[in-house]
Structures are given as C-alpha cells and as structure tokens.
Amino acid sequence: MGTEQAAAFIRALADANPAPETELLYTDPFTLLVAVVLSAQATDASVNRATPDLFAAAPTPDAMAALGAEGIGPYIRRIGLWQGKARNVAALSRLLVERHGGQVPADRAALEALPGVGRKTANVVLNVAFGEEAMAVDTHIFRIGNRTGLAPGKTVREVEDRLVARCPPELLRDAHHWLILHGRYTCKARTPECWRCPAIAFCNYRDKVLKPGG
C-alpha cells in the first residue's frame, strides 16, 4: 500500500469516528498508566471492571505503593496474569514516588524504566495523557497493518514505524485509537466484518468478507 492509499485508509476511519477515545477508565496520568499496565494480554473490559475499586482505594502512587502487591492483588484477580501485574504496579508506584515526586513522567525513557512498562504502554501514556503523536501498536493494530497492507511488518516496531511514516501528520495522534477500535469491532481476528468497513475501498486484503456469514 502506497502512502496516498494509506492516508486515504486512515482518513476513512477518521470520518467514521471523528472523536475517538481510549476505552480504559482513568482520571489522570497515574490511573491511566496503571490501567494500561493491567491491560497487557487482557481486555479493556476486564480491566474496567477491576479498576474503579482499586483506584478508590489507591488513587495516587503513594497510596498504591502503600497497598503493595498483596493489597493490590485482591482487586485485580479477575484480570489475566494478575499476580505479576500486582507486583509491577506496586513497584512502579514506589519508583514514581522515589524518582519522580509522585508524578508520571512525560518522557519515554523514564516511562520504560518502570516495571511492567514497555514501548507500547509508554506510547499509550504519551499519546493519551500528554498529547504526543505516538503510535502504540497492539495485537489489533499489528493485525490490521499486515492484513490490509497498511503497514506490513514482521515486528511490532516495523509496523509502528511504517504507520508513523504513512499516516497524515495531523491525524497521527488519533490514528492509534481509530486503528485499535477498528480492529476490536470491525477488522476482527477470526472474521473481519468487511461489509461494514468504512475503509474497504482502500484495503488490500484479498479475502474480504462481504456479507455476514460469508
């Protein structure tokens, strides 16, 4: 897919959803960071069922660090890999207090130095909390990039770099949301619902599903 076609693909998604937002529940950069860490290999819905009570009990890094992994665990048992995530959330909260005065840093290297925070999580926080034009590539976006020809790549970083290069600059900040939501609800893993895809005219996927059940 060339640059002009890729831009048309993304613009079609933008026209269909002018004001995209993350589906994770959060109130500030800290609760967003925790929610994104918890969402790794889990659904946003499962995270959203757990975090209201967790954030009510520990809305700040100080309070979360005071809970510790043992205190965090009971709130997030319904989320996959909860034990490791409880340890990471407790540890990153302590480091936010010790290194950053209890504030989430708006810096990629500082974010990625926190336990449980990789490039994708850092990109989400930079994008959503701090308004940076970052492209967080999850399994949905990786699939779309390769399936449609939008940004093919063997690695997540290859897909990310190609998306950034091909996305119209003025749409880059929101493109992360458009693509995730498109992969979650339309361009699904098992059976893409191509018949209702707003970008079908610009998609290179050969095996389009043009009607329900087809």
Image (cartoon, rainbow, N blue to C red):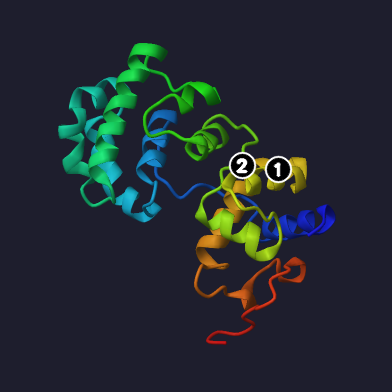
In percent of width and height, residue 121 lies at 47, 38
Q: Which residue is mark 1?
A: 164
Q: Give the amino acid type for the residue marked by disc 1 in the picture.
A: Val
Q: Which residue is mark 2?
A: 135
Q: Residue at x 54, y 22 (%)?
A: 107
Among numbered discs 1 and 2, the one appearing first in the sequence: 2
Q: Dot 1 lies on which element?
A: helix
Residue with the most extreme bottom position: 214
Q: Dot 2 lies on which element?
A: loop
Occupied quadrant, residue 148: bottom right
Q: Give the amino acid type for the residue marked by disc 2 in the picture.
A: Met
Occupied quadrant, residue 6: bottom right
For this view, does 172 lie left or right of residue 187?
Answer: right
* Of 115 and 154, the residue lying toward us: 154
Occupied quadrant, residue 87: top left
For this view, does 126 lie left or right of residue 4?
Answer: left
In percent of width and height, residue 100 lies at 41, 14
Please indicate, yes or no, whether residue 21 appears anywhere in the rendered image.
Answer: yes
Tell me whether the residue at label 1 lies in contact with that at label 2, contact meaning CB atoms closer than 8 angstroms.
Answer: yes
Q: Residue at x 46, y 50 (%)?
A: 23
Q: Residue at x 61, y 50 (%)?
A: 19
For this view, does 109 lie left or right of residue 97?
Answer: right
